[in-house]
């Protein structure tokens, strides 16, 4: 179990099943995105996707008061970092040639690129925008009903 302080200084618990659910969801979602975009994927993308979604979940849980666009920037940088680590290991060190971004502008070692960084920022914006509304249901419950006049 992981503990995180919320904005009121009290501790919230993040459980192993919650992290496992986030990881397994990413293991499914990331390869599906890649299949839709490229038409093929690799098993390492499933693990990478799991780590990415788990990291996004941890960012949302750890920084609930942070504006979603800042969380999106942090999420995009986290995904790019994980992509660089996996790419360096799998593509450059092991030579598996899973992906190669050398034909894209502003790439680094052919493993990450600004183009995909912008895509990750957009997807993270969507994720954190939705997650922010889901994690704050009290905003909708505590609204006072206004009279129509």
Image: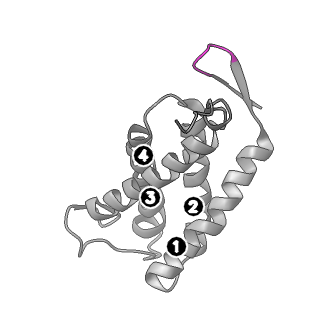
**Mark 4 / mark 1, whichever is N-terminal:** 1
Magenta residues span 6-10
Residue 112 at what x, y percent from top left?
A: 34, 61
List x then y, in percent, for residue 116. Answer: 34, 63
Give how far apart the Cα atoms at labels 3 and 2 are: 13 Å
- For disc 2, the marked residue is 49
Residue 90: percent from left, percent from top:
48, 66
Most extreme residue toward the front, as rendered?
A: 149
Instruction: Give the distance between the C-alpha atoms of the residues marked 2 and 1, in whole angstroms.
Output: 10 Å
Q: Residue furthest toward the top?
A: 9
Q: Which mark is residue 33?
A: 1
Q: Residues within 10 Å of mark 2 (few under 14, many from 20)?
A: many
Q: Is the residue marked by circle 3 packed among few (<14), some (14-19), or many (20+) residues within 10 Å?
A: some
Task: Say what secondary structure mark 2 lies in.
Answer: helix
Q: Earlier in the sequence, mark 3 or mark 4?
A: 4
Q: Is residue 46 above or below residue 78?
A: below
Report which quarter residue 133 is drawn in: top right
Q: Which residue is mark 3?
A: 123
Q: Residues within 10 Å of mark 4 (few under 14, many from 20)?
A: many
Is residue 133 magenta-colored?
A: no
Nearer-N-terminus badge (2/4):
2
Quadrant occupied by the N terminus:
top right
Kindly check if marks 4 and 1 are in contact, taking CB atoms under 8 A apart as contact.
no
Q: Main secondary structure of the magenta part?
A: loop
Residue at the outermost left position: 105
Q: Say which residue label 4 marks.
A: 72
Foreground mark, 3 or 2, reads: 3
The reply to whether the C-beta atoms of the residues labelled 2 and 1 are less than 8 Å apart is yes
**24 and 47: which is toward the camera:** 24
Can you tell which of label 2 and label 4 is closer to the viewer? 4
Horizontally, residue 22 falls left or right of residue 41, namely right
Q: Earlier in the sequence, mark 2 or mark 1?
A: 1
């Amino acid at each position: 179990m992981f503990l995180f302080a919320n904005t009121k200084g009290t501790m919230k618990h993040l459980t192993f099943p919650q992290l496992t659910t986030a990881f397994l969801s990413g293991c499914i979602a990331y390869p599906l995105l890649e299949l839709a975009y490229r038409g093929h994927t690799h098993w390492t993308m499933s693990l990478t996707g799991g780590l990415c979604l788990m990291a996004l979940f941890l960012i949302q849980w750890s920084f609930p008061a942070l504006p979603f666009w800042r969380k999106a920037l942090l999420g995009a940088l986290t995904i790019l970092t994980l992509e660089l680590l996996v790419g360096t290991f799998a593509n450059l060190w092991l030579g598996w040639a899973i992906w190669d971004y050398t034909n894209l502008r502003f790439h680094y070692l052919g493993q990450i690129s600004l183009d995909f960084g912008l895509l990750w920022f957009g997807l993270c914006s969507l994720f954190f925008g939705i997650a922010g509304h889901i994690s704050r249901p009290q905003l909708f419950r505590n609204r006072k009903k206004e009279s129509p006049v």
